[in-house]
Image (spheres, rainbow, N blue to C red):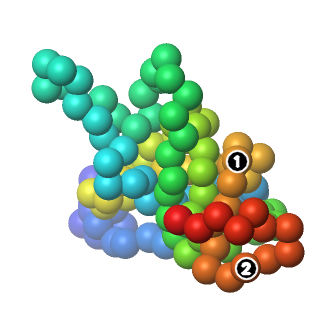
Amino acid sequence: MSSDENNEDDQKRAVRVTGDRILCTPPDDSDRRSKGGIVIPATAKTADRRGLWGEVTEVGPLVRTIEPGDKVLFLPDAAIEVDVRGDVFLIVREREVHAIASGERTAGSTGLYL
């Protein structure tokens, strides 16, 4: 391998989300521990249907109703966990999002706040 190829691998590359995908940060408590102390990742399948709230950092070009900065509710098994230079992110399709919490009040909102 030449030194040019090594330099290419070390360069930082911009990450863009494609299609109707949403890139979000997992909640701080997304990793749970079992009684024995084993860490259970947020994307592990469990018997309960507990949803996760993640903060949106980037959206794909086909996403219509979600913007960066919103918080979205989704099921853990609908997310793909990715590591980008040591930071963990979740990728979710827009159709897998069950609720959106944004900073501004929109028509048809429930009046509930996080």
Sequence-earlier tag: 2 or 1: 1
Q: Nearer the viewer, residue 10 or 45?
A: 45
Residue bearing mark 1: 98
Residue 39 location, x and y as percent?
Answer: 23, 31
**Residue 71, quarter of picture:** bottom right
Residue 53 location, x and y as percent?
Answer: 51, 53
Against 31, residue 14 (above or below) is below
Task: Give the residue type that dot 2 points to.
Answer: Arg
- Element class at badge 1: loop
Q: Nearer the viewer, residue 107 or 3?
A: 107
**Circles 2 and 1: CB distance less than 8 Å?**
no
**In the displayed structure, does residue 29 sit left or right of residue 78?**
left
Residue bearing mark 2: 105
**In the displayed structure, does residue 99 sit left or right of residue 65?**
left
Residue at the (39%, 54%) spot, across then down: 27
Query: Of the residues tagged 2 and 1, which is closer to the observer?
Result: 2
**In the displayed structure, does residue 3 sit left or right of residue 108?**
left
